[in-house]
Image (cartoon, helix red, strand yellow):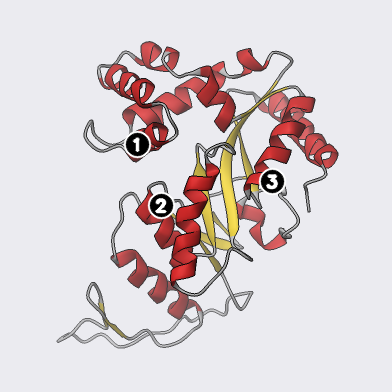
Amino acid sequence: MSAATASQVGRKGPRSASHQRRSDSGILAEPRSWSPSWESQSYLLKKALTREKLRYDGAHYTLPLPLGPGKALQLTVHPVREKISIYLAAVGPKNLELTGEIADGWLAIFFSSEFSAESLASVRAGRERVGKTMDGFDVVPTVPLVVGEDWKACADPVRAYTALYVGGMGSRKQNFYNDLMVRMGFPAEAAEIQEKYLSRDYAGAMAAIPLEFLDATALLGPKERLVDKMKALAAAGVTTLSVSLMGQDFEQGIVSLRAVTDALDVSGVGS
């Protein structure tokens, strides 16, 4: 289930794979805050990849630059496929709508099957605005993975990652990941995590993360538990699952990847 293999994914359900920021099947971008220039950038990128000469006169960009010696250029190499997909790593509601409008897929973080309806409603609203449905749109959450018999103990390696994003990304006034945790129903906990993290009490920030939140946004525990979570993710609309190994050495990582692959097979939701 990852953007790295998005071109291989069918619509029946998710496929498991590792996450990459850039791949041969898609171009991935992270809009940290909403800006209309993302629409211009998406248009220019798509136009460039069709090997058209790049001319553009918009609100944010003018190509070639006026009053200069530049000429309209075109891509000198031939892409290996006619269409290269664009994915946005959106978090807030406005960026989710924008993702639905201009992108082919969404790279989600802290994706919870229980909360997904609200996020996907924003994506759907963006697609409807431009006359599109969710058909063919790739929903790609990156999900931490820790395999073991005690799922609660498996949550501990995920705490540092979660505390960094919820507590340390952005400023005290603007942190999109913290805002996401608030929208997911954990306002007091999000505030405590941020306060402790920005005060450099990293252990306290990690301890303040509710086990419920970690369980909702990660794959934790034995294979049987992973099977149930994959079924829930597929039912929630996930089409590609990107797993992220947490706190594991190479050998442990191989074991975990085998377990999650077996779980996908057993779940029956893989394509």
Residue at the extreme left: 67
Q: Position of residue 229 (x, y in %)?
A: 69, 33
Sequence order check, earlier mark of 3 and 1: 1
Residue 182 lies, in percent from the top left, at 37, 32
> What residue appears at the point 54 percent right and 21 percent down from the top-left corner?
212
In-image side of 195 versus 166 (left or right): left
Q: Is residue 88 visible?
A: no
Q: Residues within 10 Å of mark 2 (few under 14, many from 20)?
A: few
Q: Give the spatial CA distance, label 3 vs label 1.
A: 25 Å
Disc 3 element? helix
Dots 1, 2 in contact, CB < 8 A: no
Q: Residue 179 shows which numbered tag? A: 1
**Mark 3: few, some, or many residues within 10 Å (few <14, many ≥20)?**
many
Q: Is residue 18 above or below residue 133?
A: above
> Residue 20: where, in percent of width, then height?
56, 49
Secondary structure found at label 2? loop
Q: Which mark is residue 30?
A: 2
Query: Which residue was labeled with disc 3?
Result: 234
Q: Nearer the viewer, residue 65 or 38?
A: 38
Q: Residue at x 68, y 27 (%)?
A: 250
Q: Quadrant of the C terminus?
A: bottom right
- Going by the numbered disc 2, the residue's amino acid type is Glu
For marks 1 and 2, the one nearer the N-term is 2
> What is the CA distance from the residue labelled 1 to the residue labelled 2?
16 Å
